[in-house]
Image: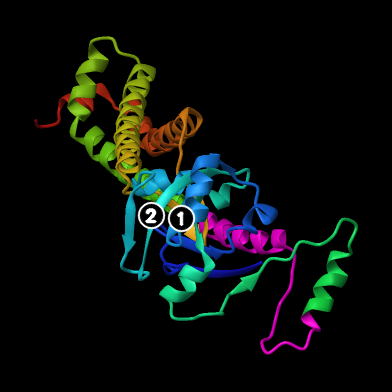
């Protein structure tokens, strides 16, 4: 089945829109889509009709029956239905008729790739070599579809690794910032700590007080940050990362928020160790002699 592709730039990592121009009558042979029969009939009977993946529909805020125009891609279509699939990456695909998409691009008869369904028991590698050896007018590169998916996932994995480096850098900056703020605070409160020592506070009490303050500041910042991220995802400002039609959505849950809180709380604890140690070693007599 020939397929014509149309998508926004793959360099955009948050709002990639992918349209597949397909032969509607052949699509069920190559894709297992959970579609309402009435919606499928409406899609098959309308030249400019479209089926939209459920996640793409939610992400874009579209509705079934809506006329959608995408000026950046030079196409418009009517959404006749939505579909679910076992392949998460396919939830963001928009299916339209191949002829319609070729006409919109003024590229009649041109497709970007073709799907081939081998017979049961066929040697996929041998079939790929045979297709590439055909005397065609264009050069082909035939490979199993899962290999193409793996390449796209590898690109997403690289983006995830970059994200981890950014997060680690932010934690280091936070550690330095909290540590510096607590160091200044403990120096300014040396006389206060001296008074507390004369009132019966033990060094361990001061240690726990400063450590608790540093952890509380870090966790308060973590809670605020998590709320802002959750709000950004809910409003659609942060949607996910994409690469050439494959997308990983941002759907943090309780475990992710707990892990974030523990990581930031741990960073706050480390940042406060030195200031807390200094507060614990305050000498009451010397501290009381300091000017206010």
Q: Which residue is mark 1?
A: 50
173 sits left or right of 200 in the view: right
Does residue 54 belong to the magenta stretch? Answer: no
Residue 212 drawn at (x, y percent): 35, 24
Residue, x 33% and y 69% (percent of image)? 72
What residue appears at the point 65 percent right and 59 percent down from the top-left corner?
26
Q: Residues within 10 Å of mark 2 (few under 14, many from 20)?
A: many
Q: How many numbered markers are drawn?
A: 2
Residue in view at x 52 percent, y 60 percent: 245
Label 1 neighbour load within 10 Å: few <14, some 14-19, many 20+: many
Where does the image place residue 273, in percent across and percent down from the top left?
40, 34
Any magenta on residue 158? yes
Q: Residue furthest top?
A: 200
The colour scheme of the drawn protein is rainbow
In the foreground, 94 or 143: 94
Given the current orientation, which residue lies at the most extreme left position? 292
Magenta residues? 132-161
CB atoms of marks 1 and 2 within 8 Å: yes
Which is more N-terminal, label 2 or label 1?
Answer: 1
- Is the stretch drawn in magenta largely helix, strand or loop? helix
185 left or right, relative to 150: left
Residue toward you, 285 or 178: 178
Q: Quadrant of the N terminus?
A: bottom right
Q: Quadrant of residue 199?
A: top left
Vertically, is 126 above or below 260?
below
Front residue of 91 and 227: 91
Q: CA distance from mark 1 to mark 2?
A: 6 Å
Image location (x, y in percent) of residue 253: 47, 32
In the rendered image, is residue 165 in sight? no
Q: Position of residue 168 (x, y in %)?
A: 46, 50
> SS at mark 1?
strand
């Amino acid at each position: 089945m020939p397929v014509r592709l149309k998508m926004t730039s793959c360099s955009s990592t948050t709002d990639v829109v992918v349209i597949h121009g397909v032969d509607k009558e052949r699509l069920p042979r190559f894709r297992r889509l959970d579609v309402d029969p009435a919606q499928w009939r409406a899609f098959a009977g309308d030249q400019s009709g479209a089926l939209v993946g459920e996640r793409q529909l939610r992400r874009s805020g579209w509705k079934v029956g809506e006329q959608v125009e995408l000026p950046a891609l030079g196409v418009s279509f009517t959404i006749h239905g939505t579909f679910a699939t076992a392949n998460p990456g396919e939830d963001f695909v928009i299916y339209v008729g191949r002829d319609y998409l070729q006409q919109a691009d003024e590229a009649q008869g041109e497709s970007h790739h073709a799907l081939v369904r081998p017979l049961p028991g066929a040697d996929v590698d041998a079939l790929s070599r045979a297709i590439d050896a055909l005397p065609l007018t264009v050069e082909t590169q035939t490979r199993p579809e899962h290999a193409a998916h793996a390449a796209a996932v590898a690109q997403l994995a690289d983006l995830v690794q970059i994200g981890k480096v950014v997060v680690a850098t932010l934690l280091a900056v936070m550690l330095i910032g909290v540590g510096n703020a607590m160091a200044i605070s403990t120096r300014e409160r040396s006389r206060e700590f001296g008074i507390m020592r004369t009132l019966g506070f033990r060094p361990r009490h001061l240690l726990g007080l400063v450590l608790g303050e540093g952890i509380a500041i870090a966790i308060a910042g973590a809670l605020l940050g998590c709320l802002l991220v959750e709000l950004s995802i809910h409003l659609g400002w942060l949607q996910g990362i994409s690469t050439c039609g494959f997308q990983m959505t941002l759907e943090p849950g309780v475990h992710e928020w707990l892990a974030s809180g523990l990581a930031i709380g741990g960073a706050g604890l480390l940042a406060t160790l030195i200031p807390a140690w200094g507060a614990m070693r305050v000498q009451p007599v010397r501290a009381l002699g300091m000017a206010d």
